Amino acid sequence: MSKNTKENLKNMKSDELKKKLAELREKIGVIRFKAEGSKSKNVKESASLRKQVAKILTFMNERKQNAKQK
């Protein structure tokens, strides 16, 4: 994960993270639906979106674990 992405996630509140997560999942669904009908121009877009979702979920889980430890 790039340093810039980590800093952006640290600055976001949990509501914003959940909203961003929902937006990314919606985009993944749209891309998947488009892929059924025809070839997409950007093949790697769905993979990068899935990685972004994973980064957000990982960060949210780390934040939750840190809160439990304190």
Image (cartoon, rainbow, N blue to C red):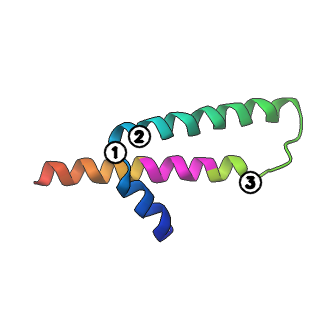
60 and 17: which is toward the camera: 17
Three-letter amino acid code at the position of disc 2: Glu
For the residue marked with disc 1, what is the amino acid? Lys
Q: Residues at badges 2 and 1 in contact (C-beta under 8 Å)?
A: yes
Give the residue displayed 87% in from the left and 29% down from the top.
Answer: 37
Distance between the Cα atoms at labels 2 and 1?
Answer: 5 Å
Disc 2 from disc 3: Cα separation:
25 Å
- Where in the figure is residue 57, as x and y percent of width and height? 42, 46
Q: Which residue is mark 3?
A: 44
What residue appears at the point 36 percent right and 57 percent down from the top-left corner?
A: 10
Q: Position of residue 27 (x, y in %)?
A: 65, 36
Q: Residue at x 39, y 52 (%)?
A: 58
Q: Residues within 10 Å of mark 2 (few under 14, many from 20)?
A: few
- Could you tell whether 38 is left or right of 15 in the image? right
Residue 22 position (above or below residue 53) = above
Q: Residue furthest front?
A: 11
SS under mark 3 = loop
Rendered image quadrant of residue 16: top left
Give the residue drawn at x 49%, y 39%: 21
Give the residue number, with chain letter if any, for mark 1.
13
